Image (cartoon, helix red, strand yellow):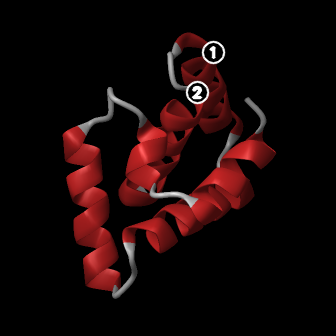
């Protein structure tokens, strides 16, 4: 999986679909709540989460994302979930 593919996918798809079958319901609920509070749609919130991660994540955060991508059945989903958590926890 390439980061470019994830960026393209987030632009044109429902982020929940990208997360795959094994997504964390708490993360999705937190993201929906944060998106609503910011007056954004969930896809827009996810797009910004990815962009913010690309710009601001440190080496440790990148290493965690790469590890999750390599270990998971859904690399895009693992990556997006980590990036959403990074934004939510930031």
Residue 39, picture quadrant:
bottom left
Q: Earlier in the sequence, mark 1 or mark 2?
A: 1
Q: Helix, strand or loop at disc 2?
A: helix
Return the x and y of residue 17 as percentages of the image width and height. Answer: 42, 45
Q: Nearer the viewer, residue 74 or 46?
A: 74
The C terminus is located in which quarter? bottom left
Q: What residue do we see at 64% from left, 52% from top?
A: 9
Q: What residue do we see at 38% from left, 68% from top?
A: 42
Task: Say above or below: 53 vs 60.
Answer: below
Query: Residue pushed farthest top?
Result: 71
**Left or right of residue 75: residue 86:** left
Residue 89, picture quadrant:
bottom left
Return the x and y of residue 25 as percentages of the image width and height. Answer: 21, 41
Residue neighbourhood size for the residue with mark 1, other residues' Cα within 10 Å, grouped as few (<14), some (14–19), many (≥20): some
Return the x and y of residue 46 as percentages of the image width and height. Answer: 49, 61
**Left or right of residue 42: residue 53:** right
Asked if the residue at tag 2 contacts the one at tag 1, i.e. Cβ–Cβ closer than 8 Å, the answer is yes
Which residue in the protein does label 1 denote?
70
**Left or right of residue 53: residue 90:** left
Cα–Cα span, label 1 and label 2: 7 Å
The N terminus is located in which quarter? top right
Numbered badge on residue 54: none
Q: Nearer the viewer, residue 21 or 71?
A: 21
Q: Helix, strand or loop at disc 1?
A: helix
Which residue in the protein does label 2 denote?
75
Task: Say above or below: 23 vs 85.
Answer: above
Q: What residue do we see at 31% from left, 60% from top?
A: 31
Task: Say above or below: 19 vs 56.
Answer: above
């Amino acid at each position: 999986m390439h980061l470019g593919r994830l960026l393209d996918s987030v632009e044109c798809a429902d982020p929940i679909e990208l997360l795959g079958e094994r997504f964390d319901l708490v993360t999705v609920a937190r993201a929906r709540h944060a998106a609503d509070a910011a007056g954004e749609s969930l896809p827009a919130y996810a797009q910004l989460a990815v962009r913010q991660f690309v710009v601001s994540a440190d080496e440790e955060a990148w290493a965690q994302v790469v590890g999750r991508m390599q270990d998971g059945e859904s690399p895009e989903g693992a990556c997006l979930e980590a990036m959403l958590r990074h934004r939510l926890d930031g």
